[in-house]
Image: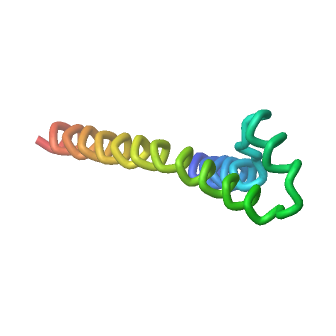
Amino acid sequence: MFNMKRKIVLLFFTTLFFVRSNAQCAMCRAVLESGEDQSAAEGINDGIMFLMAVPYILVATIAFFIYRKYRNSNKTENTS
């Protein structure tokens, strides 16, 4: 039970950190902030965050399925 609470807290802080991170490189930020329209900078930043998140989500999903497969195979070995 304690281990599950720990995982939930870790997931919460990881998600919170991900939301507050700023993904623009220094060059993109300098060019976009020099203009008066800040909506373009926000759009570029959102696009970068989306492109950065997708590979992590895919890897986490694959790791989850591998973990579940090995866990289920271990349970069937222990019961026989």
Q: Residue furthest left?
A: 80
Q: Position of residue 69 (x, y in %)?
A: 24, 44
Residue for point 76% across, 56% down:
41
Q: Position of residue 48 (x, y in %)?
A: 61, 48
Classify the position of the C terminus by image quarter: top left
Residue for point 73% across, 50% down:
13
Residue for point 75% across, 47% down:
21
Q: Is residue 74 left or right of residue 8?
A: left
Find residue 66 and report its image quarter.
Answer: top left
Q: Is residue 32 left or right of residue 60?
A: right
Q: Nearer the viewer, residue 37 or 77?
A: 37
Q: Position of residue 39 (x, y in %)?
A: 77, 65
- 62 to 40, vertically: above or below: above
- Would you say residue 15 is visible in this rendering? yes
Q: Nearer the viewer, residue 2 or 18?
A: 18
Find residue 55 and report its image quarter.
Answer: top left
- Would you say residue 2 is visible in this rendering? no
